[in-house]
Amino acid sequence: MSREDGEERISRGDGTALLIIPERFSEAVLKDEPTTLRLITNPAQRILPGIVEGILATLVDGTFYVQQVLGEPVREIMESTNDLADPPSSLVVSSVSVAFNETIQRMGEYVFPPAIELVVEMEEKEEETTSVDFGTIFFQSMLFMFLLFGAQGISDGLWREREERTLSRIVSTPGRLSGFLLGKVLAGVVVLGGILAAALALGTWLYDFPWATYPAVLFWLLLVAALLIALFSLIQLVAVSRRGASLILNVIVFPMMMLGGSFFPPEGMPDWLAVIGRYTPNGYGLHILKMLQAGAPDPRTVVVAFALFAAVTGLSLWLASVRLRSSFAKAAS
C-alpha cells in the first residue's frame, strides 16, 4: 500500500508494523550503497512487533555478510551490463566465475572441514539422572503463561465498567460493591477454569500424568487464577488511569513470566535465579503443580501452599473492595 495509507492504519492501531522501503532500494543493496529501511511498529502490541524487528535485523545482518563474500562479483556484473539490463559478455562471465571460485576456495579452509571440531565426551555417573521431558515442561509453563495473560485481561474489565458508565449505575443500586467485585473475580475464574479443565485433560492424556491427580491439580490452578485476578484487580484499582494500569501490569507480568518459569523452565536457570523465581506467585504455583502431577506430593507443603494462596487472595480482594468503595467507584459516579 502507499506510505500514507500505511501510516494511517498504524496510527489507528490496525496492523502490527509498517516497513517503508525507499526508492532504488534493490540497486543500493546490490551496489553496496548506504540505504535505510524505516520500521514503524504498533505500540499497543507487545509480542508481534518484536518478532518483526528480530526478523528484519536478521535479514539486514545476512545482507551485510553476503555483500562481504559475493558483493564484488555482483557489482562487476552490474557495471558491465548496465544494471542487469543487458546480458553479460563471455569475458565477464568467466572473470566472475573465477572470482566466485576464489571466494569458495578462500572460505573452504574454514568451512570444509570446519576449523573447529567439537568432541563430546560423556562422563559416567554412578547415579542415573532423571530425564526431563521437554513437552511436559512446556505444557506446564504454558498453563501459567495463559493464567497471567488471562488474569490481566479480566482485571482490565474494571476500567471498562467505569468508562462505559456501568459502574456508576451499580453504585446507585442497593447492592454492595464488594459483592460486585467478588462476582467479577468468580466469573473470571469460571471462564479460565473451563479452558484450564479442557487443556489439563488433554495434557494429562498426552503426557501420561496420573489421572488421580487431575482434581487436585485443577483445583490448584483455579486457586492460582483467583489469586492472580484479585492481585491484578487491586493494581488496576490503585492506578490513576487505564493506560497507567496497563503499563504497571506489563512491567510486573513480563518479569514474572521470565523468572517464574513461563519463558524459561526453572530446570535450565542458574540456581540463584530459580530460587528467586520460585517466590513469584506463578513460580511458586508452577512448583506446586509439578509436585502434584508427579503423583507424590508432600502433604504439609501442599496444605501450606493452598492455605497461603487462599489467604493472599482474600486479603487482595478485601483491599480491592476498600479501594473500589473509597475512590474508584466515586470517580465513576
Image: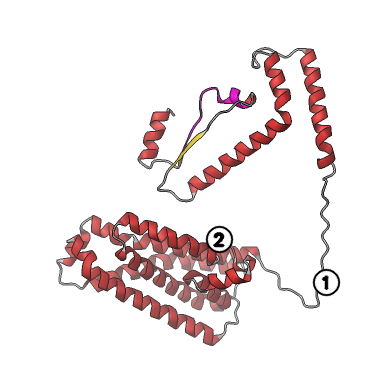
Instruction: Name which residue lies at 73% across and 73% down.
Output: 129
Position in image of residue 57 (x %, y %): 58, 41
Position in image of residue 253 (x %, y %): 45, 62
Q: Is residue 192 above or below residue 83?
A: below
Q: Which mark is residue 263?
A: 2
Q: Secondary structure at mark 2?
A: loop
The three-letter amino acid code for the residue at tag 2 is: Phe
Q: Are marks 2 and 1 in contact (CB under 8 Å)?
A: no
Q: Which mark is residue 193?
A: none
Please state which of residues 198 and 284 is positioned toward the viewer in this rendering: 284
Q: Secondary structure at mark 1?
A: loop
Q: Label 1, on which residue?
A: 124
Q: Quick check: 204 left or right of 236?
A: right
The three-letter amino acid code for the residue at tag 1 is: Glu
Task: Find residue 85 and report its image quarter.
Answer: top right
Q: Residue furthest bottom?
A: 300
Task: Find residue 60 and report its image quarter.
Answer: top right
